[in-house]
């Protein structure tokens, strides 16, 4: 071999070595990056861990806080609000009634016709529209004028047959925010949640605001009840099944209510009702306990929200927030590694990833996870390999699993408070034979997250069985109530007339 050829060969070897070295370096670097995201995932899994022991601590904390909230005003983060609802619809109601429901994302209007028998419930003309976002931080006048206008259009559509002329229409106002009631048909707004910010409305009578707006439009309608959405769901549950004692809403936000004995509502001593009980609106979204598994993502989400230090439980379990928790995890992964490619500014935008997309990612059953790829592309992240898409699915799974299991612990906490969890409540122990006498309890559940996100529902129901045990769970029936909040509120108004 000549000198030149030797030099060439040597150069080729050197070049090959350095190419190999670069490749090895890259591989090591990429492995390190992958290791970084795997560590972020692992840290998330640990932070969101909800073994049954921890869930039981949450159950106990919920029951204890319920007691505290019933004992004195301000005794707990759980407001345990009186609703003045002591009789629930029985199934014998008759007539035509309306409901207007302001939720966190949607407003709904519907009409029900009741024929005096349970099987004769005709839900007519359900309208559901997204709440225009500018209304969420407008003025009370703008908001209520809009609701009255929508109501007017709704009534204009109906034929004369649905309501005989000259008879005032009876309306339920289903309102999904905390209200301090002075009667079933009046109450003032305590605070906004779920991103609403019309500060001048706090302290105002909500039913009166709607009634005035309806009057201004010349509508012959009477706001006969101001109903929390959970109480609506409980009413529909009870109408169909009198064993219904608890209702939970898991939609944009989350809340629960239940039937309580009046003598247990210590902060309102002397409260008398014919039934001896009253529905209590827990406002459980504000529940807090040191046993809740909280991560740095939850802390940041809370700090940057319009209601920080508030609604801690809601921020871990409800539809407004799950998407943003997932987004925060993906953002951190993309900042600490390059597995999502060049950084996307969209990913830094709060609430850009909706919980609807989280369920679409989680439930993507295409072999190549095409739906995941599509959603990531919408977030400005394109062409990520399959293993990264799988990682995103896992993040959604971890966040949703925690949410479902915590919601189950909340429900079990209520069951414990009312002695339906098989343990005899938090003050007394019961014998095994008494457990066998366990009363059947129906838990009515509604809300967009619960109704539409199958994996959430499965995690919640599975955890409830885990907490209660197979035996007791046989007595606890979770029933989905489609549009329960609105339909049930109309039924409640009907029951007030009879
Ligand atoms: P509102 O809270 O206004 O009463 P819903 O009870 O219908 O309305 O809840 C709507 C919320 O439920 C949405 O904003 C979303 O967070 C959640 N949601 C609805 N559909 C789905 C879905 N398919 N997957 C996950 N979350 C969903
Ligand atoms: Mg709702």
Image (cartoon, helix red, strand yellow):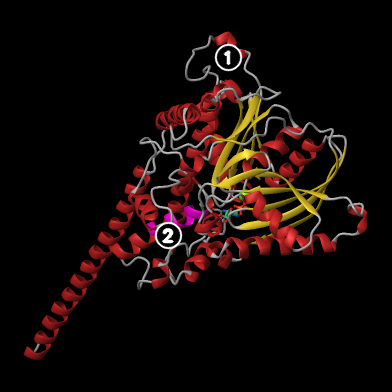
Q: Are there few (<14), some (14-19), or many (20+) residues within 10 Å of tag 2?
A: many
Say above or below: 409 vs 417: below
Which quarter of the figure is the C terminus placed in? top right
Residue displayed at 21% across by 75% down: 19
Which one is in front, 27 or 86? 86
Which quarter of the figure is the N terminus placed in? bottom left
Quarter residue 147 falls in: bottom right
Left or right of residue 71: residue 300: left
Report the magenta stretch's main SS: helix
- Boundaries of the magenta span: 320-329
Left or right of residue 289: residue 165: right
Which one is in front, 212 or 160? 212
Residue indicated by mark 1? 435
Residue displayed at 54% across by 33% down: 411
Q: Is residue 324 magenta?
A: yes
Residue indicated by mark 2? 327
Q: Secondary structure at mark 2?
A: helix
Q: Earlier in the sequence, mark 1 or mark 2?
A: 2
Give how far across and how far down residue 215 sits, in percent.
75, 58
């Amino acid at each position: 071999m000549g000198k030149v050829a030797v030099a060439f060969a040597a150069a080729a070897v050197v070049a090959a070595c350095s190419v190999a070295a670069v490749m090895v370096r890259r591989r090591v670097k990429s492995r390190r990056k992958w290791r970084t995201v795997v560590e972020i995932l692992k840290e998330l899994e640990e932070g969101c861990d909800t073994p049954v022991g921890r869930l039981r601590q949450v159950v106990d904390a919920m029951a204890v806080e319920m007691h505290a909230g019933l004992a004195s005003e301000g005794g707990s983060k759980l407001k345990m609000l009186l609703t003045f609802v002591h009789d629930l619809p029985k199934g014998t109601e008759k007539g035509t009634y309306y409901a207007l429901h302001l939720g966190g994302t949607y407003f709904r209007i519907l009409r029900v016709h009741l024929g005096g028998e349970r099987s004769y419930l005709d839900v007519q003309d359900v309208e559901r529209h997204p709440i225009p976002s500018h209304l969420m931080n407008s003025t009370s006048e703008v908001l209520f004028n809009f609701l009255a206008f929508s109501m007017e259009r709704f009534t204009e559509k109906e034929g004369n047959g649905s309501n005989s002329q000259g008879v005032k229409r009876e309306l339920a106002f289903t309102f999904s925010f905390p209200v301090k009631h002075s009667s079933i048909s009046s109450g003032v707004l305590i605070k906004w949640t779920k991103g609403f910010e019309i500060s001048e409305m706090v302290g105002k009578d909500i039913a009166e605001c709607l009634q005035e707006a309806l009057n201004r439009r010349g509508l012959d309608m009477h706001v006969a009840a101001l109903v929390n959405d959970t109480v609506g769901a409980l009413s529909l549950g009870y109408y169909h099944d009198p064993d219904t004692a608890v209702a939970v809403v898991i939609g944009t936000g989350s809340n629960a209510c239940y039937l309580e004995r009046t003598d247990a509502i210590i902060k309102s001593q002397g409260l008398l009702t014919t039934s001896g009980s009253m529905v209590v609106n827990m406002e459980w979204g504000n529940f807090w306990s040191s046993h809740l598994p909280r991560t740095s993502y939850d802390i940041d989400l809370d700090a940057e929200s319009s209601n920080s230090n508030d609604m801690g439980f809601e921020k871990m379990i409800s539809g407004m927030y799950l998407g943003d928790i997932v987004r925060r995890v993906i953002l951190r992964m993309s900042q600490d590694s390059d597995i999502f490619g060049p950084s996307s500014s969209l990913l830094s935008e709060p609430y850009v990833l909706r919980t609807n997309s989280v369920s679409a990612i989680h439930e993507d059953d295409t072999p190549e996870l095409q739906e995941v790829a599509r959603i990531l592309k919408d977030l400005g992240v394109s062409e990520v390999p399959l293993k990264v898409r799988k990682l995103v699915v896992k993040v959604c799974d971890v966040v949703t699993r925690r949410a479902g299991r915590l919601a189950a612990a909340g429900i079990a906490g209520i069951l414990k408070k009312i002695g339906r969890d098989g343990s005899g409540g938090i003050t007394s122990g019961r014998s095994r034979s008494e457990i066998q006498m366990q009363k059947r309890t129906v838990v009515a559940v509604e809300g967009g997250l619960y109704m539409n996100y199958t994996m959430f529902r499965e995690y919640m129901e599975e955890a409830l069985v885990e907490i209660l045990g197979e035996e007791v769970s046989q007595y606890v029936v979770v029933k989905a109530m489609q549009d329960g909040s609105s339909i049930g509120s109309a039924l409640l108004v009907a029951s007030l007339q009879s």
